Amino acid sequence: MLSDYIEGDENLLEDNSSLDEDKNKIKISLKINDEFFEKENEIDEDNESEREILYNKEKESSPLNSEEFLEQSPEENNSSYDEYYLERIDEVQEILEEICESIPSYAYEHLNGGIILTEEVKYHEESRNEDLLIMGEYQRSVLGNMIKIYYGSFMEMYRFSPREILKEKLEEVLLHEFTHHLEFLANEWGLVIEDNKFLEEYRKGKANE
């Protein structure tokens, strides 16, 4: 995983010296329709969103299915997926807000676009057979600097996971994207380089298949 390359992401949680005393100021914007993205796509040429955390579904071990889910008929399978898929979005939003409360206030400086939780499933443009999911992105555009968390991508990977595992994975991705933000402010690109290394390894693996 990309965040395995990163030393120090967890320091965001350890440094509580500058936490905002008013925790209620930390809010996660929930987008469950396409209006926000249609607006953003109109100015896509000004958008930089290459800073992603990617998961290779072929290599990542995750409890995608339960035995009961696999035993269902296709009709029952689709119905249960839709119900469960929609059920957890409030839980994910709540978990993200819990994580944000542990992140010091300096990390939010110039993050004027906020943190967006979208129901979208997003695959990398180089993904083959939908095996390279984008879990989160740090984006910069005329709309501001923002972090996007892709709820749909998390449900593809962890929809049957317990809350503890889901929180661990959300924290990993969110801290990764905060690190991109802080590196951008400091004009450092170490994490971008590591992300590119991950993508290059993916390309090599696919070329050798």
Image (spheres, rainbow, N blue to C red):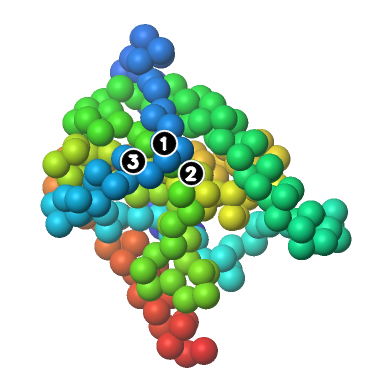
Determine which quarter of the picture holds residue 66: bottom right
State which tag comes first along the sequence, 2 or 3. Answer: 3
Relative placement, left or right, of 70 versus 14 is right
Residue 167, placed above or below residue 15 = below
Tag 2 and tag 1, C-beta contact below 8 Å: yes
Relative placement, left or right, of 187 versus 106 is left
Q: At x 41% / y 13%, what residue is drawn?
A: 23
Q: Amino acid at mark 2?
A: Glu
State which tag comes first along the sequence, 2 or 1. Answer: 1
Q: Amino acid at mark 1?
A: Lys
Determine which quarter of the picture holds residue 65: bottom right
Tag 3 and tag 1, C-beta contact below 8 Å: no
Question: Label 3 belongs to which residue?
Answer: 35
Estimate the x, y position of residue 35 in percent, counting from the top left.
33, 41
Q: Amino acid at mark 3?
A: Glu
Relative placement, left or right, of 158 versus 38 is right
Residue 119, disc:
2
Q: At x 46% / y 83%, what residue is drawn?
A: 206
Residue 31, disc:
1
